[in-house]
Structures are given as C-alpha cells and as structure tokens.
Image (cartoon, grey):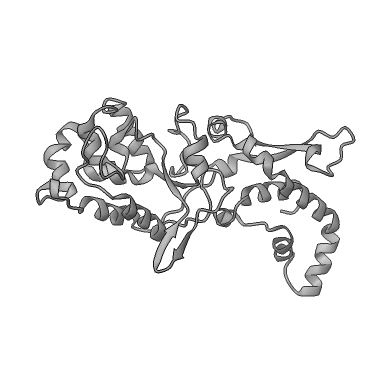
Amino acid sequence: MLKIKYSLNLENSYYEIIAKSKADKFKGLTFEEYYNKHYKKTLIYELKEILCGDFDKIVEIKDFHKTKYKNDNTVKKIFNYDKAKTTKFIPLISKLQPKISKFFEENVEVHTCYYCNTDFINKFTKGKETKNAFTLDHVLEKADYPFLALSLYNLVPSCYVCNSKVKDSKIPFDKFSPTNKDFDFDEKVKFKSFISNPNLQIEKEEDFYIKLIEHYANKYDKYIESLNLNNRYDYHKYKVVEMIQKRREYPDSRIKELSDLTQKTQEEIKQDLFGIYLNEDLHKRPLSKLIKDISEELGLT
C-alpha cells in the first residue's frame, strides 16, 4: 500500500553484513568467497546482484531460474534465512535474521505495515535491548525461490497478519511490490465511500461501505485481493463516521475562524482535527491513507 523509503548507500551496507559473514562450515571463507567458489557457476549471477539488486533485477533472476531450485536443499542451505537447523538440511550459516532485522531497524523507517497500513510495527526498547513488532515478508516466495531468501528488495517490513495470515502465496507480487521504485499504489488507488442508506445519509457504519478503487486500470486488483484489504478495512469504517461527523461540526468557515483565532494555518487546524498526513508521512501512522483519501472526499485537501 505504501512505498518503502530507504536510506542512502543502503545496498553497500546490507551487502557488507551478509557477504562478509563467516561461518565454521565456510572453512575460513566469507559468504561471498564461499558463494563464488561453490555456487556462482550454478546460479550464474554475482552475489551482489542476488543480495542487493533492485526489484527489477531480482524478478529477472527469478524468471531466469524459475522454480528450478524449489526443492534443492543445496541451494537452500546457503540462503537459509533464520533456522539453525531443519529436518531436511543443515544450514551453512544460521541466525542471520537478527542481523537483518537490526539492519531494517537502523536503515528503514519502520512505523506501520507497508502492506496494509493498519497496524504499528515500530521498534521499541525492552530493558537494554531493541525489539520490533515487524516481520519481514518475502515478496517473491522463498519456498519457490530460495536463492532470493536474503535479497534486500525481496523483504518487506509487515505486520503478522499480512505476512502469516492473509497474503495469498498463489498471487504473485512481481508487478506490485512496495520495494519497487515504480510502486504507485497510493497515487493510483483510493479509498471511496459508497452510501447504502436509502435516505442517502451516513449516520452509522451500516449506512455505507468503503472500497479501494483504482481509476482507469486494474493493476492492483490482485494486490488488494491477496491481502484481503477491502474486507479488513470494513472494520475501520468507524474512522470514516468520525470524520464525517467532525466535518459537519467544522465546515470551512469554522476552520477559518479557528485559524484566525489560533494563528495556525488552516492546514494545521485540519491536521489537529482530522489527523491528515502529507504523502511523505503516510507510513508513520495507521490508517493514514484511509484518512487522507476520505479527507479528499470531504473537501479537506
């Protein structure tokens, strides 16, 4: 739903963490050296392309190999993401997940789920440790493409519900990953309210429904379907009712009065009253896209 923003020099920093890692089973070699010696001939691509190639590049790699290595434990054991052991193979390097999670904590703004924008997934402290509430979802399924399990742009900070309960693995995300530089969901798709009350009034949640609508295209239909967004947002209609009721109490004339009285701009008054966020801040608060889109319907932006 929201494009991920990355810090500068992200790829080089990430590559250092993974490629320079060592493990007893590498026999003194780094991950990079071990890959070049034992895997590059098979997987063809440079390790940096696999780990740090942009989303178009990892889709290219996926399309080249397809699911050829889906059941190949030899490939799985070097790109294993987090397990110290499995029933089918012994990973060559283990416990990379904490390093990768810490990397995201330090280099990516992680506030709300990038897939659904309904839940906080922020980091926090517990004692002297930093914890986080996010999971890292593999956009291109690691079960099908184990060689992309560690790829930076294949990882999306997400809530547990999106990652483990609703995202449909049968619907490919090749064309609409939040890690893709061309991801434009927020511009193309908007929340719209539709009145179901025969008197054309909205007083309570049962009087209307909300739906994500993409104008002039259907690029993101499968994204919405996969994450079950329309059904999940039905629960949050209360927020729309609150906004409609508050808009009645604060028409433009009242907002102008408050602006004159407080010496704040009208935009600041709207922010205070309705919690409207600018596009660049949508990732910071749950339901911010819903609030922004409905604000447009209500003539607030």
Q: Is residue 98 left or right of residue 294?
A: left
Q: Position of residue 293 (x, y in %)?
A: 67, 46
Looking at the image, is 124 positioned above or below residue 88? below
Locate residue 210 relative to residue 87 in the image: left or right.
right
**Residue 259, position as x, y percentages in the image:** 78, 69
Q: Is residue 7 visible?
A: no
Residue at the location (49% across, 57% down)?
A: 122
Residue sitting at x 37%, y 53%? 101
Q: Looking at the picture, how far across and down is residue 241, in whole percent? A: 77, 47
**Observer able to see residue 78:** yes
* Residue 301 shown left or right of residue 99 in the figure: right
Q: Name the residue nearer the viewer: 151 or 218.
A: 151
Q: Image quarter for residue 261?
A: bottom right
Q: Is residue 120 above or below residue 226?
A: below
Identify the image quadrant of the N terminus: top right
Q: Nearer the viewer, residue 102 or 211?
A: 102
User: Toward the viewer: 277 or 241?
Assistant: 241
Q: Position of residue 85 (x, y in %)?
A: 25, 41
Image-quadrant location for residue 13 = bottom left
Residue at the (42%, 54%) spot, across then down: 6
- The outermost residue toward the front is 87
- Which residue is pictured at 88% across the width and 32% down the height? 198
The answer to whether 142 appears left or right of 239 in the picture is: left
